[in-house]
Amino acid sequence: MSTAAGVLNDVTSVLFVLLAVVTGVQWLRRRDRAAGWIALTFLTLGLIVTVGRLEPAHPHGFGEHLVTRLLIELLVLFPFLLYRFAVVFDPPSRGLRLVVLAFTASLTIWTFALPTIPTTGQSWPAAFAAYVVVFVVHWALLSIVVAARLWRAGLGRPSVAANRMRMLAFAAAMMTLAIIGAASVRNTHSSAEITVQVLALLSGTAFLLGLSPPQFVRSSWRVPAQREIQLAIRELMTLATTREEVARRVLPSVVAIVGARAVAVVDGDGRTVASEGIDGPRPPDSEVLNIESPGATLVVWTSPYAPFFGDDELRLLATLAALVGIALDRVRLFEQERETRLALERANEVMTNFVALAAHELRTPVTAINGFIQTINHLGPRLSETQLGEIRLALEQQTGRLAQLVEQLLDLSRLDAAAVEVRPQRVQLRHEIEQTVRSAAQGWQSDVEVDVASPDDALVDPVVLDRIVTNLVTNAFRYGEPPVRVAVRTIDDYLRIAVEDAGPGVPPELEDTLFERFTRAGVARDRVSGTGLGLAIARAYALAHRGDLRYERVRPRGSRFVIELPSP
């Protein structure tokens, strides 16, 4: 039986030294507080089993007695250091912290104040027996605190982290039982001694599994979540076709991997694609982790235990973040391809409309002009002066219409090619607006009200101003109804011009495409001539001037177009 106890003692000693090495390596790799406290804890235990095997059974002299007391002090410190490791993640109340510190300090003083420490086989004096009782109580209480905190914290954690934390809680409990057993066993060759060694061995094994479980153990613990993760990755790479789908398929997996309390997926441009749990209340001890990869970042709010107990899971999150980045890039390319296809379809539609419009609009005045010229050539001598005058007027109107269409097409080509050079200069606003309106409202001057309440001058390009206002006033009479009001204001270094009519307004279904080329307003298409280019040209000129043009519905009826041009 003594041989079995010795073998178990040797194995346990090797295991505790191995724990000291493992936790020391973890601290060198991590360099955080939790790793530091646990490394110090098992360095203490490693020194106890190493130096304790070299200590003589019956120490003599001051030095050997001092070594004995130091080893006992290390035993006093072991549960305290383990407690400090546990409370790194969840700080204790001030009262508990003071009680533990006072208890440990008092026991430390008592360790060195003991008059004598009996050796193996000697009877225990009353003072030493009382010390052992307090020592066991101290160890038991701290171990219970550690075990309770770790076990409670493991509830709701992912499988690997939860099992690691449970292993540490179990190890602390087994170590306490071993210490209690060692304190009560007086015969080193009894079955009780073997039981103590078995408890110590179980404790050491559980500590090792909790702090550094082998890969095959981690894999077995991760089996339930592994299937879900694999399914999410497969769907992520094959089924997700939008940013929202990518995020929807990956968020539950992120939560499952590290037990996240909230998570957000951020794309390469820094925009939050989707989130879960962000709007709800989060515990104040949430640990914020940014898992970055090219093309995507996973922002994870998790418990403070995750960085220590979920290191493998965090590496898995990094892999998942890389896959999310790839999926988002694929979605971006898909969206670009779709946008390009839609743009090509729209361009083809615009080109078709342009050809049809140009054929129709150009054919009408050209045909009329050709007919009038043939009439003059064949019937000129027989026509009266009145008839010739009517023909000349019709020719003037048709050539003007033709010139306007050609000018609009030239405007569009210049704007498309960014060949319009904007040259702001000081202009007299009232004079410039009134002259433009007079030219645009031919025969309708009495139905136009011009209200210029801005300063007398402004820094704008007069050509751009003329083209925009002309198009808007022309449209107001063509598609709306008089009276037409042109109001000019200067607001915050912007020249604001509003052109408002009293017509029926723009149909709601056309408001979204109002400034696109060849868009014409509903019934007006059938009763008035026009190319549908005026508003597109006006807005393009406004944008070229670093301004904008927008539409506002007027109640109870009417339309208002507002131009804003920078005029510092």
Image (cartoon, grey):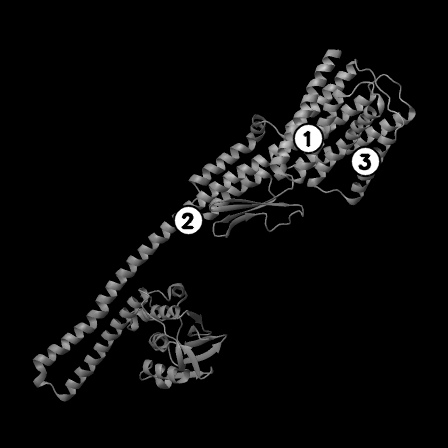
Query: Would residue 433 be visible to someone looking at this image?
Result: yes
Q: Say what amino acid the circle numbered 3 marks.
A: Thr
Q: How crowded is mark 2: few (under 14 residues within 10 Å), some or many (20 or more)?
A: some
Q: Mark 3 to mark 1: distance in Å? A: 22 Å
Which residue is found at the position 57% from the left and 34% from the top? 312
Q: Is mark 2 on a helix, strand or loop?
A: helix
Position of the N terminus by quadrant: top right
Q: Which mark is residue 168?
A: 1
Q: Which of marks 3 and 1 is in front?
A: 3
Q: Name the residue under label 3.
A: 104
Q: Which of marks 2 and 1 is in front?
A: 1
State the residue lying farthest toward the bottom: 385
Q: Nearer the viewer, mark 3 or mark 2?
A: 3
Which of the 4 quarters of the picture holds residue 542?
A: bottom left
Q: Is mark 3 on a helix, strand or loop?
A: helix
303 in relation to 160, above or below? below
What percent of the width, then of the height, locates residue 89? Answer: 68, 40
Q: What element carries label 1?
A: helix
Which of the 4 quarters of the picture holds residue 176?
A: top right
Front residue of 488 and 526: 488
State the residue lying farthest toward the right: 126
Which of the 4 quarters of the picture holds residue 533?
A: bottom left
* Label 3 or label 1, whichever comes before in sequence order: 3
Q: Mark 3 to mark 2: distance in Å? A: 60 Å
What percent of the width, then of the height, locates residue 267? Answer: 48, 49
Q: Which mark is residue 23?
A: none
Q: Say what amino acid the circle numbered 2 marks.
A: Arg
Left-right relation of 189 to 303:
right
Query: Would residue 501 be visible to someone looking at this image?
Result: no
Q: Mark 2 to mark 1: distance in Å? A: 46 Å
Front residue of 533 and 165: 165
Q: Mark 2 points at which residue?
A: 332
